[in-house]
Amino acid sequence: MNKIDAKAFAASEFLSQPIKMHVGGKEVAASNGQTFDTLDPGTGKVLAKVPSAGATDVDAAVDAARQAFNKTAWRSMPAKDRAVLLHRLADLIDQHTPLLAEIESKDVGKPRAQASAFDIPHAAQTFRYYADLSVHTRHREPFAVSGNDAWSVRQPHGVCGFVFPWNFPFLLIGWGVAPALAAGNTIVIKPAEDTPLSALLFARLAEQAGFPAGVVNVITGLGETAGAALSSHPGINRMSFTGSPEVGRLVAEACGRNLVPVKLELGGKGAAVLFDDVAVDSVAEALAGAVTLNAGQVCCTATRWIVHKKVAEAFISKAASTMGAMKIGYGGDEATQIGPVVSEKQRRRVLGYVERSVKEGAEAYLPGGVAEVSGYKDGFYVKPALLGGAASNVCAREEVFGPVAYVMTFQDEEEAIALVNSSPYGLANSVWSSDLSRATRVAERLVAGNSWINAHNLFPHGVSYGGVNLSGCGGGVLGPDTLEDYYRKQSVVRPL
Ligand code: NAD
């Protein structure tokens, strides 16, 4: 196993070696020798050739995870001993932040400064949070019953499968796998084909932290082959999928056939409701920042801006000027605020939505379009767009997943609530008002997994984050309940 030395190991060195998957503690190519390309979205050029796993490779990874579950001390070691390893992993993540942030920035296109200030440390913190929570979780709990000595015992499920999307590859690994590992499960990860690299570094770091071989396995491959093979595998005990509702349905169907419990974290069409008592300029700046974060490729971000008629004109003017002034550029450039979107396919999707929206009658306060970035002519850059108009417009209803906001106006509270709740999605919304009792009242009536007040995109460890309706089911992430999801509870009874 390659040991990573933080000083000697650079992104260029990682990328210059053949990229391998991580199965049973070994670095392996796909059994059929096939590879696919992962691109740098900022240059449009190939970043690395990555193994393209098929069903045989997925079998090997699930088998390695099963062997590690059955034959190593991982599942049965005291929670405090596993927590030591999880803390060591978190420390290694921190120590390798420059490497991880550079790889994440090159693979996703996101500003490197954002990856190193947020994505990577947030993931490290997720491991610490679940490590500590698992230590304070009671392994055995008595039932208060008469005539019997009875208790319940928390056991890990076994092998857990994870399929992830491309927008926050490393951060989402933390959200997904940290509770599963803390509970004593073993895992198989299938990262998105657009962004497979940081998952491979994660597996190496886990092993360097002292996790037994086979506890963490990573297979890289296409969704319809490797992803489908993992989610329909009869050898997994639990499945977690993060991605689009369309693929989520396929994964849930496959798990349903095997009676494997599945957790789905899906897309969103988040709203921000702005009352007329806010400081308009600062809210406009905050929402401009939210919708351009990660080039708008954020499942829960505010893309529907529902603004009180009295302040709409001033708000739109400030938001459009703020978004229009943002620096679009390569993720590795310090000044960059908006990097490229992840692929040419994603760029076509974003541009197509803006075009359809305008054709359907939306007003374009900021028209969006292709962005030219000097020195990076083949990168997948788009300009932010600010549109507005009727609630029936395609950009008011569907997830664009790009730096595109859509403004609608309202006169009274009920109208605003109805507009937010007209969406089939239910991930996250925010309410902005200086009247906290009104903000609380409205926040609690918005149908979604998360409501935020006077802020958008809040992810504190210890607060559950999940979606309802088209945005997900089967639980969420980041909260104490997610650790519970990764234990099976077994009752034991002895007549007295
Ligand atoms: P996607 O659904 O296209 O792909 C997600 C993953 O599924 C990828 O790894 C892909 O390879 C895999 N996949 C594709 N076909 C598959 C199949 N038939 N069987 C099994 N796996 C398959 O999503 P995406 O385009 O990568 O990500 C964007 C979506 O993810 C958006 O809808 C976004 O809102 C959502 N998302 C949700 C959250 C959340 O926490 N709720 C977080 C991030 C992203």
Image (tube, grey):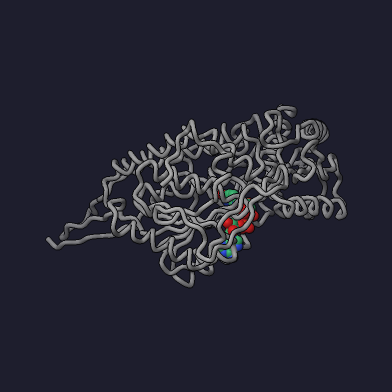
Q: Looking at the image, is 433 positioned above or below residue 354? A: above
Who is closer to the viewer here, 68 or 127? 68
Who is closer to the viewer here, 124 or 359? 124
In the displayed structure, does residue 135 sit left or right of residue 106? left
**Residue placed farthest to the left in the image?**
496
Residue at the (63%, 62%) spot, across then down: 246
Who is closer to the viewer here, 270 or 312? 270
Is residue 99 visible from the viewing direction of this image? yes
Residue 71, by quadrant, is bottom left
The quadrant of the image that shows the C terminus is: bottom left
Pinpoint residue 198: horizontal percent, then vertical percent.
Answer: 54, 45
Residue 52, by quadrant, is bottom right
How many marks overall?
A: 0
Residue at the (45%, 56%) spot, across then down: 188
Residue at the (59%, 65%) spot, across then down: 224
In the displayed structure, does residue 455 sit left or right of residue 74? right
Pinpoint residue 349: horizontal percent, then vertical percent.
Answer: 75, 54
Pinpoint residue 368: horizontal percent, then vertical percent.
Answer: 82, 43
Is residue 440 visible from the viewing direction of this image? no
Residue at the (69%, 34%) spot, across then down: 289
Pinpoint residue 312: horizontal percent, then vertical percent.
Answer: 80, 36
Who is closer to the viewer here, 295 or 488? 295
**Residue placed farthest to the bottom in the image?**
257
In the displayed structure, does residue 36 sit left or right of residue 170? right
Classify the position of ligand 1 by quadrant: top left, top right, bottom left or bottom right: bottom right
In the displayed structure, does residue 389 sit left or right of residue 183? right
